[in-house]
Image (cartoon, helix red, strand yellow):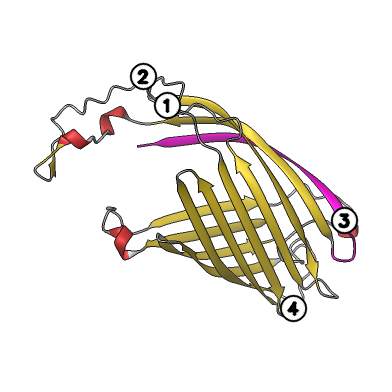
Amino acid sequence: ALQNTYANASLTFNKSIENEHATYISLGFTGGAVQQSFDPTKIRANNQFSNGSFDGNIDPKEYVFTNKLNFNTLAAGISLSGGLGRENNTRYYLGAAAFNLNRPKTSYFNDAYVRKAIRYSFNAGLRFTLSNAWSLAFTGNYSSQSPFEETIGGASITWRQPNVMPGAYFALTMGTYYRLNDAMIGLIRIDYKNYNLTCTYDVPNPEVSKWISNSGAFEVGIGYRGFKAKLNNQILCPGFEDNNLNN
């Protein structure tokens, strides 16, 4: 099985270009170390399939130089974000980024000419505050890493508990997204105070499910928001989430 381990650091510069709608241009950089490894005994090669069935006793004749890669990676991106309307009840963002700018070597065969292609990403989002408790968000992302492309988009609706004491934030988000020609994705997220729990489940298209052994993919994410400045409520900052998230 393939395993990936990442250790990254990020740095972002934010430039305010308009105060009334908290409009910002943000420039970000991220870089770090990556380790990729796999189990050579689980290689399945074309020559191991005979008469439509797999035979593990056949030598795959795949001789790798190493089963572990270590490399560094660098990425950069830029975004425009802000609010719309008199009370900024609608928020938006537009972004673009490029990954693998240093073109790291990623070959298990000691081939210096095999390097990871640069991946370009473009994304956008629009969030509407419907009431004191409800908000609706639309987001989309397009990625290209020659010769592959990925387009994903969808919507989510959030209910937050209104009229709570500062620091007692609670919200529930549910959404549906579509990865073009691949899968439908269901999402549920719970925010409580500084913590959040996100769960997603991918349901592959019928054409895709014919070629994979499992029926879907389940992912769980846990987050914590901290290290807030004491005067953050007095400073306009770029953001796309619920305006009351930091209360």
Q: Main secondary structure of the magenta part?
A: strand
Labels 2 & 1 near each other (Cβ < 8 A) = yes
- Residue under label 4, please give it: 132
Relative placement, left or right, of 232 versus 116 is right
Name the quarter where the C terminus is drawn: bottom right
* Span shown in magenta: 1-21
What residue type is disc 3 on? Ile
What residue type is disc 2 on? Phe
What residue type is disc 4 on? Asn
Relative placement, left or right, of 4 versus 126 is left
- Residue under label 2, please give it: 65
- Residue under label 3, please give it: 17
Labels 4 & 1 near each other (Cβ < 8 A) = no
60 is within the stretch colored magenta: no
What residue type is disc 1 on? Ser
Measured in 3D between alpha carbons, the distance from the residue under mark 4 to the one under mark 3, in whole angstroms, is: 28 Å
As drawn, the label of residue 188 is none
Q: Earlier in the sequence, mark 4 or mark 3?
A: 3
Q: Position of residue 12 (x, y in %)?
A: 76, 43
